[in-house]
Amino acid sequence: MSTLRHALFLALQVLRSSPGRSSVLTLGLTVALFLPMVTWLAGEQVEQRLMSRARSSPILLGHKGNEFDLVMNALYFRGRLRDPIPMHARDEVAAQGYGVAVPLYIAYSAAGAPLVGTSLDYFPQRGLTLADGRMPAVLGEAVAGANVARDFALEPGDKLRTDLTNLYNLAGSYPLVLRVTGVLEPTDTPDDDAIFTDIKTTWVLDGSIHGHTEVTRNDALNPEAEEGENLEATAAVFIVSEIDDKNLGSFHLHGDQGDGALSSVLVFPRDARAHDQLLGDYALEERYQAVIPEQVVGTILGIVLQVREGLELYFGLVAGSTAAFFGLVIVLSLRLRRAELRLMQRLGCSRATIAANVLSEIVLLLMAAVALTGLLTWGSMAWLSSLL
């Protein structure tokens, strides 16, 4: 034990005497260890997060087209679908008794966070519960995900304005002030970064549902009109930026509710038979497609895994070249220290003691590289986790 302690002490002094060489060797070993480790861990974490979300979403119904866009929009709230489907599609699934059919309309945002129009069925199916407040009950109300509420310090009773998406669309898409009625418990899913509202509130942003305000003489273009004469109002009078108790009753839907736009329908079948029957019924459907998100995400991950395998091979070559470089530096260092090693022999050190000293230097370098690799890996994974 005393010999090992002395060897470690001498090795530490040698490394301190040449900080440049020690730093280069440590950094080289760190890179060789860090790159393959963080690549593997990152791939595993991304795969686990994506597949977990996909497995909790049995069937997704949407407009026939790009199934990848459909899944990314409905599950991760990314992008906007060009071709919506009508509410009739959701009603048909519900009428057939396949299971719980949850409408989704994801086309707008508020304070940069995706605005998810849905029904109250979404929350129990996703395991979402309230940390504070209540669920939306009327037009213009919303609940905030945990991360959104934290970032903007939102509480029940606060207000949030939707983002302007089309400056030239006077029929809809103008900013609407939402009243926050609740905050959701964190779930470590994309739901934490979203704002949820009733599907009809998103139709208000579309303009298919809108309200009218009473025209007064102060608002009219012809305030000098005679008694009984119709007042002519400006377009600005009809743009209601906030839904409250006074104007809520004036909001109405133009057309049939079944024609209202949806991005997709998330279906939770009642059993395996309903699951297979739904897929079979929509297999030959010309307008809509029913996809299994787990299969779609698996296809995406298959491409990612192929890239990861190529990176692992590349990083393996980097690790091999680094190990060769490390061994070369050690051999050259021993040659340069030949006089020093001879002096140690003359002082009475055995070959075993000298070998123990050299081995201790290598062990200390490896320990420093492993510690630095662990620190960098932990920081990288924490950063990746925050992004996911």
Image: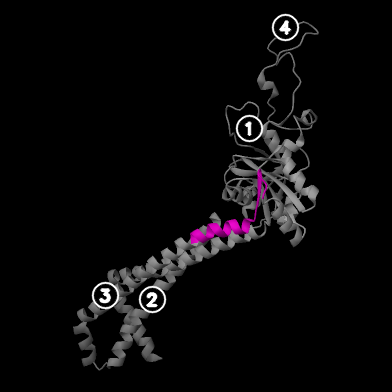
Residue highlighted by disc 3: 329
Question: x and y percent of residue 45 in the render?
Answer: 55, 63
- Contact check, label 1 and label 4, Cβ < 8 Å: no
Q: Residue at x 77, y 54 (%)?
A: 98
Residue tagged 4 = 224
Residues in magenta, as a range: 284-304
Where residue 205 appears, x then y in whole percent?
A: 67, 34
Question: Dot 3, how many residues are within 10 Å of its Cα: few (below 14), some (14-19), or many (20+)?
Answer: some
Q: Which SS class for mark 2?
A: helix
Residue at x 28%, y 74% (from the top left corner)? 17
The span from disc 3 to disc 1 (Cα, nearest Å) is 66 Å
Within 10 Å of disc 1 (Cα), the crowding (few <14, some 14-19, many 20+) is many
Marks 4/2: CA–CA distance: 89 Å
Q: Which residue does the image show at 74% across and 24% down from the upper left? A: 212
| Mark 3 / mark 1, whichever is N-terminal | 1
Q: Using the rendered image of the protein, determine whether residue 274 is visible from the camera's viewpoint.
A: yes
Query: Is the C-beta separation of discs 1 and 2 under 8 Å?
Result: no
Q: Which residue matches tag 1?
A: 173
Q: What residue type is labelled 2?
A: Leu
Amino acid bearing label 1? Ser
Instruction: Give how far across and how far down residue 238 sits, in percent.
Output: 70, 23
Where is residue 337 drawn, in percent x and y? 22, 81
Judge by depth and name the residue closer to the eye, 2 or 165. 165
Return the disc, 1 or 4, that comes first in the chain's sequence. Answer: 1
Q: Is residue 231 left or right of residue 113?
A: right
